């Protein structure tokens, strides 16, 4: 298992139990069942990242750990709440840090399948948040996987056992894990 390809999850919110992070965990676990190692950077992890300063010549060990995990990853799953109709600042700050990979042999998210999840307290912001995430992944040269999950947390509730009130949402989150797992082995991680 130590040699298994890695799927990294980035997402969640800070300050309390996060439905976004719980949704992400379900999708990551589905990738894990396909034989992948998984690593989750949730709200608490992202809150430890300083605001990204592109000119800084030093990086904290939290920043280094995050960038190293993404460099090592064969696939990503990103989950954001809809905040004012788009992705949250916390998630965006983490993604901005990927600028550190600009000069890598495989820069940014090049050639990586990326699963997407958006939660919002209503439907409208789920769509705009997924659209924003897709644009960001394209800008980072990644490959958004075909299905993205839009979760309305006004009607869908998660529990701390990995359960969710709506079986269709469970199916959608598992599909995201399976889709990134299906495409990840096709990717040569050296970027050739
Ligand atoms: C600052 C802020 C802005 C928000 N903006 C929106 C919004 O524009 N549309 C919406 O439907 N929900 C909005 N919400 C609600 C969250 O998207 C929603 O509750 C989400 O599921 C929270 O995820 P969590 O449980 O992981 O914290 C906002 C919440 C916050 C705190």
Image (cartoon, rainbow, N blue to C red):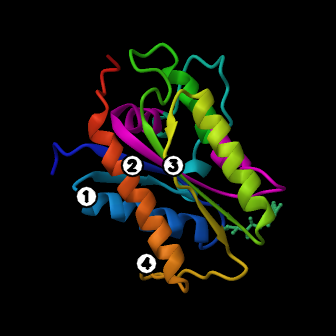
Ligand 1 occupies quarter? bottom right
Q: Pick whichever of labels 2 and 1 is earlier in the sequence.
A: 1
Could you say whether the residue bearing mark 4 is in a helix, strand or loop? loop
Q: Is the C-beta separation of discs 2 and 4 under 8 Å?
A: no
Q: Which residue is mark 2?
A: 180
Mark 4 and mark 3: span between their CA atoms? 24 Å
Write down the residue under mark 3.
146
Left or right: where 4 falls relative to 51: left
Q: Is residue 10 visible?
A: yes
Q: How many marks?
A: 4
Q: x, y (%) of residue 93?
A: 66, 39
Judging depth in this view, the residue of 128 and 83 nearest the camera is 128
- Say which mark, if any, is on residue 34: 1
Disc 3 C-beta below 8 A from ligand 1: no
Label at residue 162? 4
- First in sequence: mark 4 or mark 3? 3
The residue depicted at 48 percent of the width and 40 percent of the height is 62
- When asked about the image quadrant of residue 161, the answer is bottom left
Q: Residue 75: where, in percent of width, then height?
A: 39, 42
Whole-percent x, y for residue 76 in the image: 44, 45
């Amino acid at each position: 298992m130590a040699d298994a390809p890695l799927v990294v999850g980035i997402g969640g919110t800070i300050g309390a139990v996060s439905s976004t992070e719980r949704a992400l965990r379900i999708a990551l676990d589905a990738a894990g069942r396909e034989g992948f190692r998984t690593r989750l950077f949730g709200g608490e992890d992202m809150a430890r990242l300083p605001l990204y300063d592109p000119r800084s010549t030093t990086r904290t060990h939290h920043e280094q750990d995050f960038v190293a995990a993404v460099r090592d990853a064969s696939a990503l799953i990103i989950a954001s709440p809809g905040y004012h109709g788009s992705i949250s600042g916390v998630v965006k700050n983490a993604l901005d840090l990927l600028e550190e990979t600009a000069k890598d042999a495989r820069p940014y998210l090049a050639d990586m399948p990326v699963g997407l999840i958006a939660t919002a307290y209503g439907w409208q912001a789920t769509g705009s948040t997924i659209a924003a995430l897709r644009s960001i992944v394209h800008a980072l040269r990644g490959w958004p996987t075909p299905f993205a999950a839009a979760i309305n947390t006004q009607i869908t509730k998660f529990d701390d056992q990995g359960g969710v009130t709506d079986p269709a949402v469970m199916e959608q989150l598992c599909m995201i894990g399976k889709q990134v797992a299906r495409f990840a082995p096709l990717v040569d991680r050296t970027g050739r």
